[in-house]
Amino acid sequence: MTGRTPKFAVGGVDRPEQRLLLAVLEEAIMCFQKYLHATDAEGRRAFRDAEDWIMEANRCDVFSFHHVCEVAGMDPAYVRRGLQQWRLRRATGYSGAAADVVRAGAGRRSDRRSL
């Protein structure tokens, strides 16, 4: 990691353990997106590992996707749906640049209440 705060982290993330969990989430999302169409074994493995972690139902482990999203103030189901929709768009050949832009703070619980 680069030592910077992940792009989607918005305010209130000042404890080292929070930054670590956000870095884990950022890395998983990056691997999910970057290696979706990987043809080499290492890239396919990185995608599969990220996908398995993101889709995993485990809610108890401190490093589970669900818990990490909770710490970030994000709804895990919302983030999963967004990644699944992104994947479907990529599978159908949709290449609009706007589809790949992730709004800072998207999926935060406070954003959803105003809808």
Image: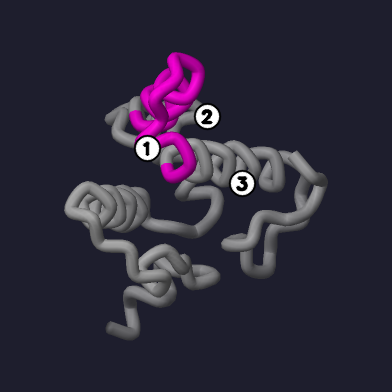
Q: Is residue 80 left or right of residue 44?
A: left
Instruction: Write the start and end of the magenta stretch as one range.
Output: 33-51
Alpha carbons under labels 1 and 3: distance apart: 21 Å
Is label 2 in a helix, a strand or a loop?
A: loop
Of circles 1 and 2, the one toward us is: 1
Residue type (three-letter) at the residue carrying disc 3: Leu
Q: Are marks 3 and 2 in contact (CB under 8 Å)?
A: no
Q: Is residue 57 left or right of residue 105?
A: left
User: Which structural element holds mark 1?
Assistant: loop
Q: Which residue is label 1 attached to?
A: 36
Q: Residue furthest bottom?
A: 114
Label 3: element kind: helix
Q: Amino acid at mark 2?
A: Phe
Can you identify the residue that label 3 sits on? Answer: 22
From the top left corner, tell me how far across and down residue 14 is, in percent: 77, 56
Give the crowd class for mark 3: few <14, some 14-19, many >=20 residues within 10 Å.
Answer: many
| Pointer 1 or 3: first along the chain | 3
Q: Which mark is residue 64?
A: none
On-image quarter of the C terminus? bottom left
Q: Is residue 94 left or right of residue 101?
A: left
Depth check, front residue: 5 or 99: 99
Q: CA distance from mark 3 to mark 2?
A: 10 Å
